[in-house]
Image (tube, rainbow, N blue to C red):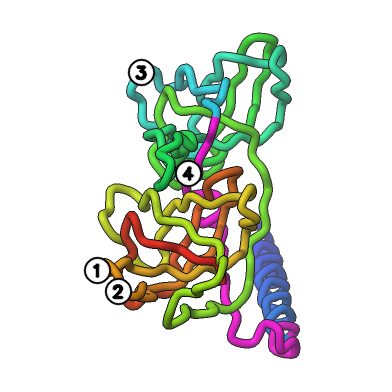
Amino acid sequence: MKKTFAYLVLFTGLIFFSAIVQAQETVQAQLGKDKTFQNAFALISEADLYCSFFILEDIPRLRITASEKGGEKSLLADYDLFYIGKGAAVGLKEGQLMMVLEMGQKISSSGSKKILGSVAFKRGRARVVRLEKEMAAARLEKICGPIMVGDFLVPFEEKEGLLGKDLGFDASARQDEALTGRIIFLDGKFTQIGPGQWALIDLGEENGIQVGRQLTVFHQGEKDLPLVAVGNVIVIHAGRSASTIKVLSAKDAVKIGDIVQVK
């Protein structure tokens, strides 16, 4: 009986694996036929969408008030249970997905020094598993950064990645009325970044910036000298007055203060 069961499990597994391989081959075949996707790659990945950072204008109302482990400084891990200090009274629903945010420093624009908001680091995803009027419990489902008691929560939004091509960077800046901004914050505590890393720019939806837009990065040299093109970036999150970009390619490090220009 045990041997029969083992064969059945093995046979089922082989069928499942075969189905996955067949599905992958079908997708690859379709991409190969479509010239649009030739030489294309994931310009915006799942990590870009759910593990990066962005500017948040208002501090969220919801936060992690305690963990099942106990302790105010508890570091949470995948599948850990935590508690929220609000519940059904503020609109939470059982089964609802939430994004965990660690709130960072306030960010200013490069020109006017106007406060744009606070940088919010996306740390993971959790699902509400128990709900009361003034309290809820949620379980972490996916983590991409440190999560602790005191971190904030906002409703999780499903987003789509983007396939495409790196358009590269122009040799010189446009001299017309091209939209221009600056790098105002870098990924982590770096002083410079390269391909695959994130940054914030002081351009947003109010400037016509949209997710998927590619921009050229320029170094500002000595006075009266032309700008030097050093890289190409893509917008992975567009806020009202600031956006998150990812460096696609660069011949030199990208730094705070560098100029970005819409192609």
Which SS class for mark 2? loop
Instruction: Say few, some or many: other residues with alpha carbon within 10 Å of mark 1 (under 14 / 14 to 19 / 20 or more).
Output: few
Specify whether residue 46 is painted magenta.
Answer: yes
**Residue 3 seen in this snapshot:** no
Q: Which residue does the image show at 70% across and 64% down from the upper left? A: 8
**Helix, strand or loop under label 4:** strand
Disc number at residue 72?
3
Q: Which residues are magenta?
A: 30-57
Tell me if residue 193 is in the magenta stretch: no
The residue that mark 1 highlights is 222
Per the model, the C-alpha gap separating discs 4 and 1 is 44 Å
Chain-order first, disc 3 or disc 2: 3
Which element carries disc 3, helix, strand or loop?
loop
Q: Amino acid at mark 4?
A: Ile
How far apart are the two marked residues, 3 and 2, measured between alpha carbons? 54 Å
Question: Which residue is disc 4 drawn over?
Answer: 143
Quick one: label 4, few (<14), some, or many (20+) residues within 10 Å?
many
Q: Cβ–Cβ below 8 Å for labels 4 and 3? A: no
Instruction: List x then y, in percent, for residue 247.
Output: 44, 66
Q: Which mark is residue 225?
A: 2
Cβ–Cβ below 8 Å for labels 4 and 1?
A: no
Residues at marks 1 and 2 touching, judged by CB atoms closer than 8 Å: yes
Give the Cα separation between the discs numbered 1 and 2.
6 Å
In the image, what residue occupies the spot 63% across and 47% down? Answer: 206
Q: If the image is split into quadrants, where does the N terminus sit? A: bottom right
Q: Quadrant of residue 92?
A: top right
Q: Residue 242: tell me if it is visible.
A: yes
Distance between the Cα atoms at labels 4 and 3?
19 Å
Q: Amino acid at mark 2?
A: Leu
Q: Residues within 10 Å of mark 2 (few under 14, many from 20)?
A: few
